[in-house]
Image (cartoon, helix red, strand yellow):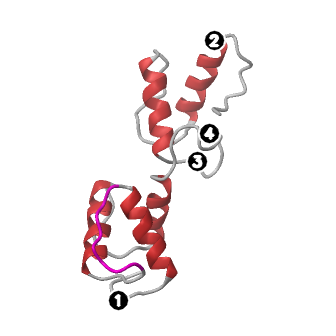
Amino acid sequence: MIAGSTGPDVADLQRRLQAAGFSISDDPGNFSFATQLAVREFQKASGLDPDGACDSTTWAALVETAFSIGDRLLCLRSPMMRGDDVSELQLRLGALGFDAGRVDGIFGPHTQQAIADFQRNAGLVSDKVCG
């Protein structure tokens, strides 16, 4: 989606941007200046190219921000799960002394091993799944 686009997909984009903390003053469903600015700011915050267009990479990153820990089962799969919920899990595991690697929001082998270690330490069945 780019500036000038209209419709329900734009309204969904705007809703997700607002939920992620970016303000938009455009009319719902109209991709105008404020929406483009919000997309750019989101892209900058997410380490993406801030071109103001919502391509598939920007959309995927925006969808990932919607998850909170506990919203879904987290496990190692291909492609690897990504999201704010994974970052929160990594932070919590680290705070408890279980090394999940770098807090990057990607559920990779280090995060999986930290979950397994936590589960064993807590006397739980070690299925390497969070949730």
| Earlier-in-chain disc, 1 versus 4 | 1
Mark 1 or 3: in front is 1
Q: Dot 4: within a 10 Å radius of its alpha carbon, few (fewer than 14), some, or many (20 or more) residues?
A: many
**Does the CB distance between marks 1 and 2 fall below 8 Å?**
no
In this view, 54 is above or below 90: below
Quarter of the figure with residue 37: bottom left
| Earlier-in-chain disc, 3 versus 4 | 4
As measured in the structure, the alpha-carbon distance from the residue carrying label 2 to the one carrying label 4 is: 18 Å
Q: Which residue type carries mark 2? A: Ala
In this view, 85 is above or below 94: below
- Residue drawn at 44 percent across, 60 percent down: 62
Near-viewer residue (7 or 61): 7
Quarter of the figure with residue 103: top left
Q: Dot 3: within a 10 Å radius of its alpha carbon, few (fewer than 14), some, or many (20 or more) residues?
A: few
Range shown magenta: 21-28
The residue labelled by disc 4 is: 74
